[in-house]
Image (tube, grey):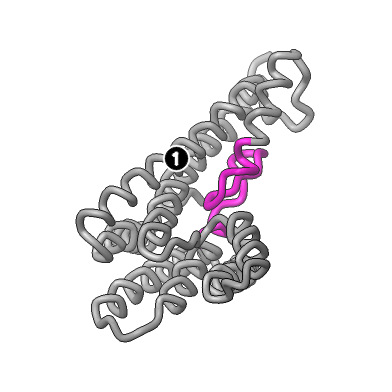
Amino acid sequence: MIGSVQPGQQAYPLQRASRNEERFAAVFALIAGYADAYAYVQFRTYVSFMSGNTTTVGSMTGQGNYGAAILSLVAIVSYVIGVFSGTLLSNSGLRRPHRLLFGIIAVLLAVVVAITQLDSVASAICIALLSLAMGLMNTTLSHVGAQSVNLVFVTGTLSRMASHLALAFAHAPLPDAQGPWDTHRRRAYLLMGVWGSFLVGALAGGFATAHFGVGVLLIPALILIALAVFDYMPK
């Protein structure tokens, strides 16, 4: 029929938007892996992996090593505050709240660089600021299309990836598919890409920190400032 819209035509804008979101998810996951590797190399504490920090709090407390337990507890509390604050900001009614989020995260990373250079502040404050930044980061993008994603930790990402692969193998339907292009296999590849980006970020962060120190945090800070200034996020 002349003027009719085919299903594929209706799905195309959703497919294009999903691919754009996928690119941003990869960038954010890379930054998160980078920052987490920096924190682990410098402080032996995760700033995005709260499952690991929870295990550390319990095990170190059980052994009487309260200093190590406190650092991990600081990371947990700060991360929760970051997610809480980022969620409030994202639902504040501001037209483009992610721009402010990017700016705040960049400032937090820059502050860590500054206070570490001064060498006058305890490690706990750097851990708190980095965990706060990662909590905020995890609220910048919660979905790629209809698929929920976590940007700063990958246990759930790997679990969902494996589930989609199994369902693809079983030829199971995808209930919330946005079009014929949106399949279990595609979502598995998407989640694999997020995990891979986090891994690449961790590799880069570990290498850079070992060779150049705290100044390496300026790299993700500058990327986030560019995202905030030029407003690259899809509308």
- Which residue is pictured at 38% across the width and 40% down the height? 200
User: Which amino acid type corresponds to the residue marked 1 in the rendered image?
Assistant: Arg
Where is residue 60 drawn, in percent x and y? 60, 66
Reply above or below: 160 against 39: above
Q: Which residues are magenta?
A: 137-158
- Which residue is pictured at 26% across the width and 52% down the height? 208
- Which residue is pictured at 29% across the width and 72% down the height? 113
Where is residue 97 drawn, in percent x and y? 52, 66
Image-quadrant location for residue 64 = bottom right
Q: Residues within 10 Å of mark 1 (few under 14, many from 20)?
A: some
Q: Which residue is mark 1?
A: 23
Reply above or below: 106 against 55: below
- Say which quadrant the N terminus sits in: top right
Residue 85 seen in the figure: no
Where is residue 106 drawn, in percent x and y? 37, 67
Q: Secondary structure at mark 1?
A: helix
- Which residue is pictured at 59% across the width and 48% down the height? 150
Would residue 194 be found to the left or right of residue 172 on screen? left
Q: Is 154 colored magenta in this rendering?
A: yes
Would residue 121 be found to the left or right of residue 62 on screen? left
Furthest residue to the left?
Answer: 212
Where is residue 72 drawn, in percent x and y? 56, 68
Between residues 98 and 12, which one lies in front from this camera angle? 98
Image-quadrant location for residue 130 = bottom left
